[in-house]
Image (spheres, coloured by chain):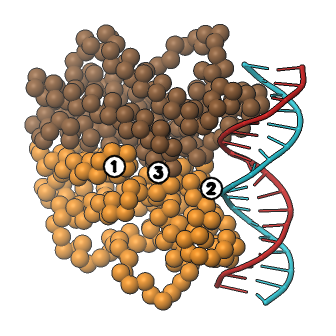
Chain colours: A brown, B orange, C red, D cyan
Amino acid sequence: MEEPPTTPLNGTKKQIIDLAESLLLQRGYNGFSYSHISAALNVKNAAIHYHFPTKTELGVAIIQRTRQQFEKWTNNSRIDNMSYLKKLDAFFDIFRNFLKFEGPVCLGSALENDFNTLPGEMQQETRAFIADFLTWLEKLLKEGRDTGEFSFSGPPKEQAVFVLAALQGASQMVRATDKTYLDMAIRQIKQSLKRE
Amino acid sequence: MEEPPTTPLNGTKKQIIDLAESLLLQRGYNGFSYSHISAALNVKNAAIHYHFPTKTELGVAIIQRTRQQFEKWTNNSRIDNMSYLKKLDAFFDIFRNFLKFEGPVCLGSALENDFNTLPGEMQQETRAFIADFLTWLEKLLKEGRDTGEFSFSGPPKEQAVFVLAALQGASQMVRATDKTYLDMAIRQIKQSLKRE
DNA sequence: GTCTATAGGGGGATAGAC
DNA sequence: GTCTATCCCCCTATAGAC
């Protein structure tokens, strides 16, 4: 879920997505413009349009890249050998990482919040993005409970919704309050999965 | 936390806040404009500026009204006589009510998401708004645990953050997915407070 | 309290030169 | 691939008539 530290010689295109993603997280879809991006890259507005003719295409590209990164992450062998609890903690890291930058929420929160104003293509991608996360989490929780590592009642899907909701909500609350709130939520998620 | 069903003869001003609040929830702070409001009320743009000279003042008015409604709600005698579990459930209703309209998130989510782009006055009000909710919830959880009605580990504040995060996150997830997700989260919150 | 009219800025997007 | 120039729309906000 992390980029390689060295940006290859490559692309304005990648730089644009990087910046646009950061802006989307920090300001929402309706809170950033091509001018924000072009100014930061020291190019003109039209240059951005060359790479992404419409803002919709840029938005879709952001979501799709994040989905691909998550897919890669789930297929990572580093994860495979972990206990279910460790896997869950690695999942939490995705959200912790968002806080390393100044005050962005996670992508899911940002997209869900602006959902009603998003172009249709982005709405579809958003739904798929959430489904990716929930599907992975549900499987983890189910298997973890089967092996006795987790304890919770009700369907795994319900528990997955609960956990993801708490993570998203806390990531979001953080920006208006205190960075420690995410850790608080994570501690309680773990607690609630531990007891029997 | 509910308005009286009959809107008294009164005010364009109240109608403006009603509409603006709905728009803020549905579209975010940067996703609605004075034109949305004036069109819906069949007046001109300038008429809105007469009541709220700046969008900032309108935004602040929305948050302050909600804070006042919440304060009234907490002082309601109907609530006072309830068990702690019933009180908590009444609190959940605040979030359930948001779903009665088509797809809005709760006010906290909307404000936290747009936080970085909000004018300073609105940021301050947002912080106070969240503090209101957390303070009330923390007290409820603490007293409920003292009487043995709730069970959880760690400081009540941490649990309050956890519960509010889950509620906000679920309210938000709902719009891009399924309305039942909020109920799922609420069931699991209750479960996690029940076990020992 | 609401209107018309307008200022002044920013938005997304395109055409055509280089 | 990036530039200049420009189009057209929407935004917040104000001035002054009614």
Nearer-the-camera pick, B167 or A70: A70
Q: Which residue type carries mark 3? A: Asn
Left or right: residue B48 versus residue A193 is right
Residue positioned 74% across, 34% down in the render:
A45
Distance from label 3 to label 2 (Cα)?
25 Å
Residue positioned 35% across, 71% down in the render:
B1
Chain letter for the residue marked with disc 1 in the picture: B
Pointer 1: what residue? Answer: B174
Distance from label 3 to label 1 (Cα)?
12 Å
Pinpoint residue B79: horizontal percent, then vertical percent. Answer: 24, 72
Pinpoint residue B33: horizontal percent, then vertical percent. Answer: 61, 61
Q: Which mark is residue B120?
A: 2
Q: Quadrant of residue A186?
A: top left
Q: Is residue A136 above or below residue B27?
A: above
Contact check, label 3 and label 1, Cβ < 8 Å: no
Closer mark to the observer between disc 3 and disc 2: 3
- Circle 3 — which element? helix
Q: Is residue A13 above or below residue A24?
A: above
Chain letter for the residue marked with disc 3 in the picture: A
Counting other residues with Cα less than 10 Å from the Cα at mark 3, is it few (<14), some (14-19), or many (20 or more)? many
Contact check, label 3 and label 2, Cβ < 8 Å: no
User: Split into 4 quadrants, where in the image is the N terminus of chain A?
Assistant: top left
- Circle 2 — which element? helix
Counting other residues with Cα less than 10 Å from the Cα at mark 2, is it few (<14), some (14-19), or many (20 or more)? few
Q: Which residue type carries mark 2? A: Gly
Pinpoint residue A69: horizontal percent, then vertical percent. Answer: 43, 21
Pinpoint residue A20: horizontal percent, then vertical percent. Answer: 59, 32
Counting other residues with Cα less than 10 Å from the Cα at mark 1, is it few (<14), some (14-19), or many (20 or more)? many
Nearer-the-camera pick, B22 or A79: B22
Q: Which residue type carries mark 1? A: Val
Q: Which mark is residue A116?
A: 3
Chain letter for the residue marked with disc 2 in the picture: B
